[in-house]
Image: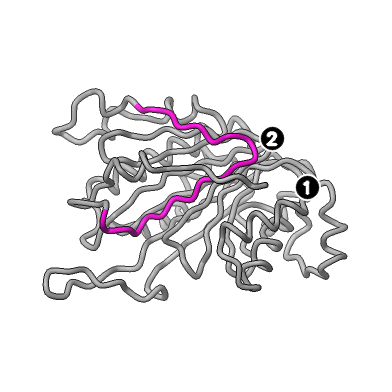
């Protein structure tokens, strides 16, 4: 049993308000510590910043993908110690008004020692960066079948190797995930980013839980292995000065078993003043992994 968690938001060409980014960092830190209940052997995080657009004649132009930045850090320590470390502070300092996602993992190691940091999450495999809760019983068979050269001794890495393989074959992320999971024998809850297009985050599951909460004001979406982690990680100080107390109230959206959500964070048409538009969350539709 491990924990995965995260916060995803949209920002436009101006970026979000700096105070909002500070609050998101505080929220994510609380969410990571709450998720420690599902694993204390290691902790890891991803912070993803969208490419900065340039304004031309009052219209924002799409910036090159290479201007996007994704940062990762992991250590074999429990979350409550991880968040006090200088390295965690350093990676939080990488967040900015252009940060679109924070993703975390707390590991309860079932195999592959956490003392070897390459066994911990997140895992990077080519274009893919991701976290996984669950197990893959046929991972060694898949390693032999595709002659994967693993960086770790962790079964989770095979999930991301498969997704990367299909991306390299020309599939989009949705298709790559669907192809990959058809070969997996096991259970999983995962969150992944394509490093060539980090404006999207895909979260998918089979027989492992992921819970979502949508913050109605600001439209940020939080996910975690258990809903109570999201609720208990809220702090009163997260809300903006002009927000009502209902700001802390969240609505739940459900990801059915054997389904996925893709969150596209760079569609400026549904964003105003650096905040998410509710249309984004209202239009969320899960896709089947079958």
Q: Quadrant of residue 239?
A: top left
Q: Which comes before the other along the chain, label 1 or label 2?
A: 1
Q: Which mark is residue 207?
A: 2
> What residue span does the magenta drawing correspond to?
250-269
Q: Can you tell which of label 1 and label 2 is closer to the viewer?
A: 2
- Residue designated by label 1: 136
- In the rendered image of this protein, does residue 275 appear above or below residue 199? above
Percent x, y for residue 170? 61, 72
Percent x, y for residue 71? 47, 62
- In the rendered image of this protein, does residue 12 appear above or below residue 233? below
Judge left or right: residue 196 versus residue 290. Answer: left
Judge left or right: residue 53 versus residue 136. Answer: left
Q: Is residue 248 magenta?
A: no
Question: How many marks can you see?
Answer: 2
Percent x, y for residue 160? 66, 59
- Label 1, residues with CA under 10 Å away: few <14, some 14-19, many ≥20: many
């Amino acid at each position: 049993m491990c924990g995965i968690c995260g916060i995803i938001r949209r920002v436009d060409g101006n970026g979000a308000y700096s105070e909002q980014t500070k609050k998101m960092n505080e929220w994510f830190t609380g969410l990571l510590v709450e998720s420690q209940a599902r694993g204390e052997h290691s902790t890891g995080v991803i912070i993803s910043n969208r490419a900065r657009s340039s304004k031309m004649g009052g219209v924002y132009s799409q910036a090159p993908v290479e201007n996007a930045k994704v940062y990762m850090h992991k250590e074999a320590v429990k979350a409550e110690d991880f968040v006090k470390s200088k390295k965690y502070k350093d990676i939080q300092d990488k967040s900015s008004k252009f940060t679109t996602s924070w993703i975390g993992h707390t590991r309860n190691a079932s195999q592959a020692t956490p003392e070897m940091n390459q066994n911990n999450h997140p895992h990077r495999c080519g274009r893919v960066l991701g976290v996984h809760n669950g197990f893959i019983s046929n991972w060694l068979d898949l390693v032999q079948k595709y002659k994967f050269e693993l960086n770790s001794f962790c079964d989770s890495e095979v999930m991301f190797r498969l997704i990367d393989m299909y991306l390299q074959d020309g599939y989009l992320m949705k298709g790559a995930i669907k192809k990959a999971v058809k070969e997996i024998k096991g259970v999983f809850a995962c969150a992944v980013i394509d490093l060539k297009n980090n404006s999207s985050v895909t979260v998918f599951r089979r027989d492992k839980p992921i819970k979502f909460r949508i913050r109605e004001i600001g439209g940020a979406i939080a996910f975690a292995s258990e809903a109570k982690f999201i609720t208990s990680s809220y702090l009163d100080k997260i809300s903006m000065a002009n927000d009502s107390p209902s700001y802390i109230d969240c609505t739940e959206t459900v990801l059915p078993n054997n389904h996925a959500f893709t969150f596209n964070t760079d569609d400026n048409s549904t964003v105003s003043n650096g905040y998410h538009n509710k249309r984004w969350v209202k239009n969320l539709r899960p896709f089947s992994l079958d």
